[in-house]
Amino acid sequence: MDLIKVAESAFESGIEMPKFGPGDTISVHYKIKEGNKERIQVFKGVVIQIKGHGNNKRFTVRKISNNVGIERIFPMNSPFIEKVELNRAGKVRRARIFYLRGLTGKKARIKEKRI
Amino acid sequence: MPGLIGKKIGMTSVFSADGKNVPCTVIEAGPCVVTQIKTVEKDGYEAVQLAFDDKKEKSTTKPMKGHFEKAGTTPKRKLVEFNKFEKEWKLGDKITVADIFEEDIFVDVTGISKGKGFQGVVKRHGFRGVNDATHGQHNRLRAPGSIGASSYPSRVFKGMRMAGRTGNERVKIQNLRVLKVIPENNLILVKGSVPGARNSYLIIEK
């Protein structure tokens, strides 16, 4: 198993990510290819889960856009991620905050973590 | 063809340069030791015999011990012949991955496939079975169907594909792209899958 990790580490995207977890609000700067032009789109929302391990690790970000909840899954090692910004550390009690999907408005707020 | 003996480590997936998530197999290839050089004059054909993976001295037979001693190496488990190397190798030389392989070339990988036991024709030969569970079918879903005509020939032709032992045979997968060569750990990453279980021996040829 160890040698698989060696092989995977040779393909790491190499971008530095801030440490974030579920409940945190982050902005993901994502490269989008249109024809042969490349532009960067920012997806800002709450991390609702981190899944997988090693090369296969990915995180789900949820945001409300035009009153519609949007969730997007990003692989941690994706070469399309330009950078990730941590906007707000949230205080939550569980690792997967799916209860957020059923809440809107003031109920859907997350307490800020004070350090 | 020139190549090396290796060991299957396992599978994973990596992101390629254009952002695609590519399935790949990690193989530990070499270092292999040259244990014999066959020539036209002596053996009737040209080949280089390579050895891979250490084995205990006490589980090596005396004749084999002498064979390894000639090359000046410890006993090895797996011996395979290759030919048409670009470089001339001498007895006892160590060949590593970086000597043979590079990125973006295509290789053929040979191994012993996983044994699957006694299997029906659908798994073994890719028959389709009966595609319908209704219209009067009840126990013929994966059956082979007719295996021949009646009074003529009054027998079943030889080689008729039927159920039986599946897997555990030599399989070669051709034209696998080399995604990466990591010389420090003797690793080679090829796109796609290769035959065999983890830790089974593989022959990787250019």
Image (cartoon, rainbow, N blue to C red):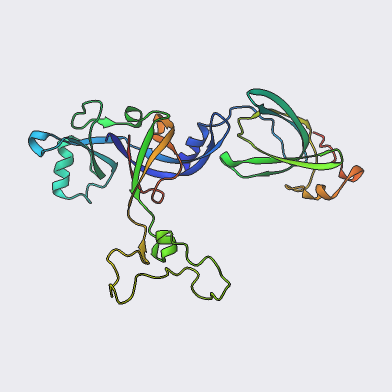
Q: Residue furthest right?
A: A106
Residue sitting at x 62%, y 27%: A15
Residue sitting at x 52%, y 33%: A9
Q: Locate residue B96, reporting x and y percent.
A: 32, 31
Residue sitting at x 28%, y 43%: B54
- The quarter of the rendered structure image containing the C terminus of chain A is top right
Q: Locate residue B193, reporting x and y percent.
A: 44, 45
* Up/down of B198 relative to A86, above or below: below
Q: Residue furthest front?
A: B152
Left/right of residue A65 with respect to residue B183 in the rendered view:
right
Residue sitting at x 51%, y 36%: A8
Q: Locate residue B59, reporting x and y percent.
A: 23, 51
* Up/down of B122 relative to A38, above or below: below
Residue A112 image-quadrant placement: top right
Residue B204 image-quadrant placement: top left
Residue A89 image-quadrant placement: top right
**B177 or B144: nearer the eye?**
B144
Q: Locate residue B152, reporting x and y percent.
A: 29, 74
Q: What count of labels does the image hold?
A: 0
